[in-house]
Structure formats: structure tokens, C-alpha cells
Image (cartoon, helix red, strand yellow):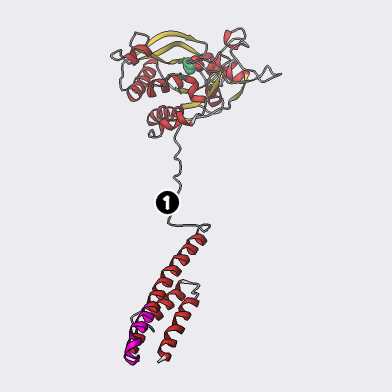
Amino acid sequence: MSDAFENVKRLIAEIAAATPQSKDELEQFRIQYLGSKNVIKPLFGEIRNVPNEQKKEYGQLVNEAKESAERKFAELQETLEAASSDAGADLLDLTRPGEPLELGSRHPIATTLNRIVSIFQRMGFTVAEGPDIEDDWHNFTAMNTPEDHPARDMQDTFYLSGSTQLLLRTHTSPVQARVMTSQQPPIRIIAPGRVYRNETISARSHAQFHQVEGLYVDEGVSFADMKQTLMYFAQEMFGTPKIRLRPSYFPFTEPSAEMDVWIGMDNEKNYRLSKGTGWLEILGCGMVDPSVLTMCGIDPEKYSGFAFGMGIERQALRLYDIPDIRLFFENDVRFLKQFRSVI
Ligand code: PHE
């Protein structure tokens, strides 16, 4: 009879000594001691062969074997799981959600520029470009700006140090000269770009800003063509064809005009922008001066044309209700982020 006790005791020792190292080994342990055909079950049956006075003690011993197997299994399960999650800590968890990628956004100047350019592209204008660092001839001379013109004054123009010929272009008009000296009419171009003026930086003006230049040269181009083109632009850009051309002066156009667009004053913003007039000044324009055509190698007897130039910043300020022009050049993401929804 002590055999039966010995068997159970051996089993208890075996259970205590078991050291499964992996989930598979633990599963083996479970099948062996706790599964439906486990080795403890038959020991309960052995109680038949145990003398009556020892039956109680034997039963308790077998129960103890069973309980020790259960306890051991729970313990092992816990330690194995803890170990496996420790090991996984420095592994890449492919199920973790990713870091969100910050979406960039277009600069409000770029969106305004693109909008203006695309309006003129729809009318058949193509984009032309010139360098930011210009020479005196393209920027001034070819634009019929006499030597003593105040625009040439050192106060307005950034010259490259030590040079009297190289400068940062003060307007996009030199692109007119670059196009006209390299091709004959018909010419229909739009030239967006950055320009520079030696000005005090404030909420309304900056030493660098953007312009879009337009030039149309062909046989029989008239002031009426210019007006119609600009009216269409106003309609597309501001939703109104109501424009006003005021006589003005530019050395490179004759006659010259400044164009205002009617934005009304039915709200505070438009009232403020138009300084209480309802009109917003948008661009300078005029018929290309015949002497400009001549200087660029185009026969003014045969051809005529119109040109216009407009600042972008002021239009962007209006479009997006931005209070200070300096915000455009500070590259503060908190500012730029606000234009994320704008294409
Ligand atoms: N270049 C002029 C300016 O900077 C604008 C302009 C362009 C006017 C073309 C007439 C024709 O103010």
C-alpha cells in the first residue's frame, strides 16, 4: 500500500521540479498533469486498493498533487507571459498605430499667384520668367526709364555691392524686355516672380514682394483689348467686372493707367481695404511705349501692345484676410498651417 503513496509523492516531486521553458513545453505540462487524460486521474482510481483507514489520507494526497499541478501551471504561465512581453519590448510592434505624417500646405502667396496665372493661361497667355538679379539695361533702360528717373535712385534699388550694372529687379517688367528681344510678335506672356525694393518694412510694405507681369504684343492691339482682358481678369479673380481705369504714369507705357476693382463697402473689411471708397487698387497698365518696342527690336509701325503689372501680396492679404504682410515671409508654421485646406 505504501506503493500507492509513493507514486503520488513521486508525482508531486516531479511536478515541483518541472521547468517548462517555452509555451510549447508549458502546453506539454498542461496535457500531462491537467489534460483530459492526465496522469493524476488514474491515481484517484487507486483509492480502491488503499486500506480503509488510509483512504482519507490518500485522497488528500492525490488532491494535493492535482492542486500543486494547477498552481504550478498558473505560476509558469504568468512568468512565461511576462518574459515574452519583456522580450518583445525592444522589437518592432507592427500593430502599433503609426506616427501621423504632417501634411504641408501651399503658401498663400503661391496659391494667389497660381490663381492669377491660371486666369491668364485660360486666355492663351503663357508663363515667361526672368532672373531676380537683373542688369540695369533690362530693368531700367529698356523700360524707357531715363537716367535721372527717381526709380533709379539708390534709395529704391538694391544694387549688388560694387556694381552699378547688376541689381535686384525692382519689378517684373524687365521680363517684357527679355521676351521681346528674343521673339517677334505675336507675344502673349504672363511673368510671375519676386521683386525687391529698398523700402522700410512695415505691415503694408516689404523689401521683397511678388508681382505678375503681363504683355500682349501683336498687330492692331488696342486699349480696348487691354480693358477687356483686365475686365475678364477682375471677373474671374474678384467676381466682378466692375473696374475703373485712372490715368497714371509709367515710363514704359503710354497712355498709362491704374486699375481699381469695385469691392464695395458693405462690410467692415472691404470698407477698410478700400479706405472708404469701395475701390481697391490692383494694378498698373498701359499701351507699350513705342520707344520700348524699338529698343527691344520690334517695329512700332507694325505692332502695338499692352502691358500690366500687379502686386500679389496685397491681393493675398485681401483674399485671406491677413493683417500683416510680414507674416508671408516669416515661415511660421502656425501661420502657414492655417492655409492647409486651400489648394
Ligand atoms: N512695373 C510697374 C510697377 O512695378 C507696373 C506696370 C507694369 C505698369 C506694366 C504698367 C505696365 O509698378
Question: Quick one: quadrant of the N terminus?
Answer: bottom left
In percent of width and height, residue 297 lies at: 56, 21
Q: Nearer the viewer, residue 198 or 135?
A: 198
| Residue farthest along the right direction in this orientation | 162
Label 1: which residue?
97
Q: Residue at x 40, y 17 (%)?
A: 222
Question: Quick one: quadrant of the C terminus?
Answer: top left
Q: Can you tell me whether the CB of the residue at mark 1 lies under 8 Å from the nearest atom of ligand 1? A: no
Span highlighted in magenta in the image: 47-63
Q: Is residue 240 visible to the viewer in this orientation of the structure?
A: yes
Q: Is residue 42 visible to the viewer in this orientation of the structure?
A: no
Q: Nearer the viewer, residue 2 or 205?
A: 2
Q: Main secondary structure of the magenta part?
A: helix
Q: Residue at x 47, y 11 (%)?
A: 254
Badge 1 marks a residue whose secondary structure is loop
Residue 46: which quarter of the image? bottom left
In percent of width and height, residue 154 lies at: 63, 11
